[in-house]
Image (spheres, rainbow, N blue to C red):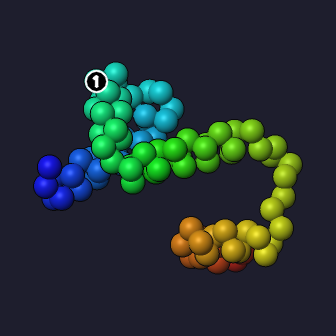
Amino acid sequence: MSEHVHTQKCSAMLGDLSEYIDGSLQAEICEQIEEHMKTCDNCRVVVDTLRKTVELYEHCSDNVEIPGEVKERLFAKLELNDYLSTAKTSK
C-alpha cells in the first residue's frame, strides 16, 4: 500500500475515533478501523491511548484538583497553552 493511501486511511479513521471508543459507531466501520489497526502501529497507539485516557477520566473523581504546576506542564505538552491562558483570565 502506498504511503499516500495509508495516510488517507489514517485520517479517515481518526475522524471516527470518538464514536469508535464510545461504541456508537456502525459495526461495518468498526470492522474497517480494526482491520486498519492490524497493519498500522501509529493508529493502534492512538486508539489505545485515547481509550486509556477516557477510562482514566471516567474513573477520576470530580473532586480531584490537579496542582497548578502539573496542569501547566500537561497543557503545554498537549499544546493547549491558549486554553490554559483563557481559563486563567475567565476566573
| Residue 30, above or below 82 | above
Left or right of 16? Residue 3 is left
In terms of image quadrants, where is residue 82? bottom right
**Relative image position of residue 23 (x, y in whole percent):** 47, 27
Left or right of 13? Residue 56 is right
State whether residue 86 appears in this view: no
For the residue pair 44 and 27, the one nearer the viewer reads as 44
Of helix, strand and loop, which one carries label 1? helix
For the residue pair 52 and 40, the one nearer the viewer reads as 40
Left or right of 50? Residue 68 is right
**Relative image position of residue 34 (x, y in whole percent):** 35, 33
Point 43% across, 35% down: residue: 19
Residue sitting at the far top: 27
| Residue 83, above or below 54 | below
For the residue pair 48 and 57, the one nearer the viewer reads as 48
| Residue 3, above or below 22 | below
For the residue pair 90 and 71, the one nearer the viewer reads as 71
Quadrant in which the C terminus appears: bottom right
State whether residue 21 appears in this view: yes
Q: Return the residue at label 1.
A: 28
Please count the marks in the image.
1
**Relative image position of residue 2 (x, y in whole percent):** 13, 55
Point 69% across, 74% down: residue: 73
What type is the residue that disc 1 sits on? Glu
Point 69% across, 44% down: residue: 56
| Residue 48, above or below 73 | above
Left or right of 73? Residue 78 is left
For label 1, the crowd category at 10 Å Cα-Cα, with few meaning under 14, some 14 to 19 and many 20 or more, is few
